[in-house]
Amino acid sequence: MPVTIARDAEIAVVSVDNPPVNALSHAVRQALWDAVDQLDADPQVRAVVLICAGRTFIAGADVREFGQPPQPPHLPDLVDHIEAAQKPWTAAIHGSALGGGFEVAMGCRFRVAVSTASVGLPEVNLGIVPGASGTVRTPRLAGVESAVSLVTSGKPVKAAKALTMGLIDAVFEGDLQANAVAFARDALSRDLPPPVSARQIEAPDETFWAETAKAVTKAAKGAEAPLRALDCLRKASESPFAEALAYERKTFLELRDSDQAAALRAVFFAERAAPRPAHLKDVEPRGLKKVGVIGGGTMGAGITAALRDAGLPVVLIEQDDKAVAKGLANLRGIFAGAVKRGRLSEAAATEHLAGVTATADYAELADADLVIEAVFEEIEVKRAVFARLVTACRPDAILATNTSYLDPRLIAEGLPGPDRFIGLHFFSPANVMKLMEIVPIPETSDETLATGFALARLLRKIPVQAGICEGFIGNRILKRYRAEAEALLRRGIPVAQVDAAMRAYGFAMGPFEAQDLGGLDIAYLQREAARKAGAEVPETLGDILVHKGRKGQKTGGGWYDYEDGDRHPRPSATVDALLADRIEAGPAMDADAISSHLVGAMTAEGQAILAEGIARSSAEIDLVEIHGYGFPRWRGGPMFAGGVRG
Ligand code: T1G
Ligand code: NAD
């Protein structure tokens, strides 16, 4: 029974229990519909509290039913039915009231919540607009401006903010059901507010819509749903309720069947499947109480910050006292940045720092359960570190490397107990980027592998298992992408035109701007190392720039020129002159041709990666690109965009 009814004197308590997130499946919709009828007919009942079991209030429509023909009662009708009930309903919210869940709550006469709850309309993240009056009721409840921010961003808001926005009526600490019942009882002695659908909207002027459309278009970066949602909100503020509702429904149905929605749904499910891979279903991961990080540079400090965000105590090892101090300074810089951006409170930053033991003494690692190495990308340096770890750590401690390009088998060669060795490849900045590639060597045990995935869950990251090859999944595709972008330059397509085409496709930056930001020297040094090791690595156009000291923004020039202290890229006559003799004029290409060429190359590399068994599925390659390299989410990733599924 997904819905049950209990009584607290004259108040009925309707409980939804449909794990895992109380989604509005057909059975739940029908049972709620019947509950309205049953309680309306019950003379003993004067008011109703709607509450949920488990970890959350109703988290929305059941996304798994999206591909099937909708069955009545339809959600918009259910919301109307609750609103039209003769007894006032109060939604009692814990966890998240999202999408259809919040729409049901708006059908209720009142909404109350615990302070940890959040409410929101995340439909645009699935490529759709709210489909059960979200764009029509929200502006009536909270005003147009708040509704625009909630609906077009898809970001939920916490209870306290929801209260100030007028989305909910009260916030409680303690027992939600008892408080909600008391609230509903108390409300019986006061005049009832009008139902949400009967409230008036104060329509904003033309300037508001013009400015908002500009801002939403910019933030959407090519995604269609936020703009269509804005359109619905405008309709809601200018038309009668029923007309606006019909418009929202029509838009919802159109978008539900769109390519963007299909892509975003695929990403949604891939993201949720990633942390719990089927092949490790029955494997118990190791518990993690203390973690060591070797190296306090860019990555080591970032990884330490990520571990502290998850509450894990960290031992941070550097080479000597001076380097320890530098590592700590890096860490402080990361926390200060997080405080500045409002991601972390001052108090939490202090506590995070207090949880780090920074030292040059490997003896501190004696009781670490896991150690992650993030020292210089040099095989001998790394091997020396692991040799020390073997004596410093427990014999069963899991040992991980964050190498980007080196072969983890070579790093682990000769290590006693190689079953506990693994690659855990984080992305910079490691406390922000969601992706984590997990790279087992042949000897890695399932327990070690499962612990890598468990760590990703703890850090709220998206883990993707990768096989061993140069660059694993992500950097291998990146290398191909950059090589193809250079190939376009050689055919006479200007740098700025390639970048503009990829921005138009939905990337925040094109391949050349991105290199200027990160520095051209990183990939250059890696190519040089390979050349020194005897590999045949042809000269790239990037090499030519680096030889002239053009390493990107940090040297005042790379693929573009930068004026002092300015991050704005300007096409460079110097670069044109430097590369002139490598360029053969070819036919012009428009933006679509450029992006389909470059994305096609990524898809092709992904197919090779799949064929070699380096990635386990095309959906996981898509996750790597979306979460590690800024591939536009609404395109679904290079594999989805290239028609490769599974
Ligand atoms: N439908 C079906 N399954 C869902 C689901 C949903 N809406 N949301 C989550 N799941 C599954 C998920 O696949 C996973 O399954 C499990 O629940 C736990 O999820 C008409 C059109 C609620 C904040 O977009 O944001 O309403 O892998 O790992 O971290 O306007 O889930 O265990 O088998 O994410 O505790 C709008 C999406 C729908 C909410 C909980 N709603 N969900 O986070 O758990 S559209 C959403 C979330 C809509 C109306 C429309 C989160 C969460 P499995 P999880 P979590
Ligand atoms: P970095 O130069 O910023 O930091 C390396 C740190 O390691 C330095 O602080 C150095 O003092 C320390 N170190 C060197 N030898 C040591 C030793 N024997 N014991 C203890 N500490 C030692 O480099 P980084 O960018 O943080 O990269 C570290 C690793 O992470 C490399 O393997 C790199 O390939 C990988 N990686 C880097 C990125 C990135 O974007 N920077 C992304 C993913 C992975």
Image: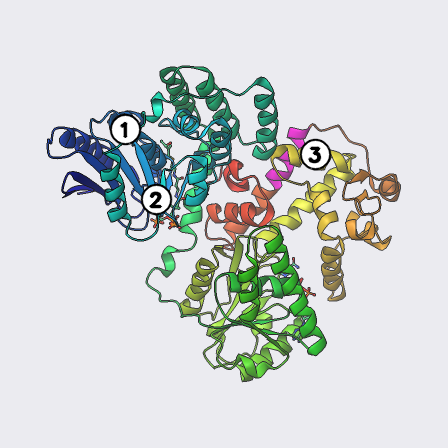
- Mark 1 or mark 3, which has the lower sequence index? 1
- Mark 3 or mark 2, which has the lower sequence index? 2
Q: Which residues are magenta?
A: 591-601
**Residue 526 x/y as whole percent:** 71, 60
Nearer the observer: mark 3 or 2; the answer is 2
Task: Determine the residue positioned at 58% across, 27% down.
Answer: 212
Secondary structure beneath disc 1?
loop
Secondary structure beneath disc 3?
helix
Q: Is residue 509 visible?
A: yes
Nearer the observer: mark 1 or 3; the answer is 1
Which quadrant of the figure contains the C terminus? top left
Q: Is residue 269 left or right of residue 32?
A: right
Which quadrant of the figure contains the N terminus? top left
Residue 113: assigned label: 2
Viewer-proximal residue, 455 or 138? 138
Q: Name the residue tied to disc 3.
A: 500
- Mark 1 or mark 2, which has the lower sequence index? 2
- What amino acid type should be assigned to the residue bearing mark 3? Ala
Q: Name the residue tied to disc 1.
A: 191
Beta carbon of the mark 3 residue lies under 8 A of ligand 2: no
- What amino acid type should be assigned to the residue bearing mark 2? Ala
The image quadrant in which ligand 2 is located: bottom right
Q: Are marks 3 and 2 in contact (CB under 8 Å)?
A: no
